[in-house]
Amino acid sequence: MKKVLLSLFLLSLFLLSGCVSQTGGENAYDVYFLTRESGQEAALAAERRTLAPEEDVVEGLLNSLLSGPSEEGLLRTIPDGVTLRGWTLENGLLTVDFSSRYGSLSGVSLTLADYSVVLTLTQLDTVDTVMITAEEDLLSYRDHQRLTAADVQSELLPLEEDQK
């Protein structure tokens, strides 16, 4: 039941989230964090962030994820101590390399962290797929290494069908 609630919430976030808006020359983006409301399971919620025009968008969004939310009731999905080692973008594939602490995530914690990174970064027109590494190593216990926003939706649909 917990998986179903999380799945439904993540799916609704994916379907309802706006991508990018420009207001007065400033770029605003959704950055996804953990939310836990009383009586509810863990889920992701978007916090709107505005990046400075001169700031690199990918770097700015990754730093926003690492620095954590400013809104009350939201929590980081990426643990304290994780740092960004680097990233590359080639042909729509954004490879993000975090420090080794990211590699210690597993289960729901890994899923929430991965989804927050993927949903945050795939809203960019230049990013189709995200691959996350820890100290340049792939996380071998992950189902697949390249993740898209559509993966979030497709992974949740079988859970919904099981409930019919």
Image (cartoon, rainbow, N blue to C red):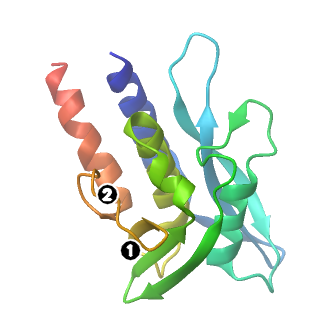
Q: Which residue is mark 1?
A: 128
Q: Quadrant of residue 12?
A: top left
Residue at image point 29% right, 64% down: 145
In the depicted structure, whether residue 36 falls above or below residue 51? above
Secondary structure at numbered mark 2: helix
Residue 11 coordinates in the image, percent (x, y): 39, 40
Left/right placement of residue 5 relative to residue 79 reads left
Q: Which residue is mark 2?
A: 150
- Quarter of the image with the C terminus in it: top left
Distance between mark 2 and mark 1 Cα atoms: 10 Å
Left/right placement of residue 41 relative to residue 7 reads right
Tag 2: Cα neighbours inside 10 Å, few (<14), some, or many (≥20)?
some
Please name the amino acid that badge 1 sits on. Asp
- Mark earlier in primary sequence (2, 1): 1
In the depicted structure, whether residue 53 falls above or below residue 1? below
Residue 103 coordinates in the image, percent (x, y): 46, 54
- Quarter of the image with the N terminus in it: top left
In the depicted structure, whether residue 119 falls above or below residue 136? above
Can see residue 21?
no
Please name the amino acid that badge 2 sits on. Ala
Can see residue 106?
yes
Q: Quadrant of residue 149?
A: bottom left
Residue at image point 77% right, 81% down: 55
Q: Are marks 2 and 1 in contact (CB under 8 Å)?
A: no
Residue 93 coordinates in the image, percent (x, y): 38, 80
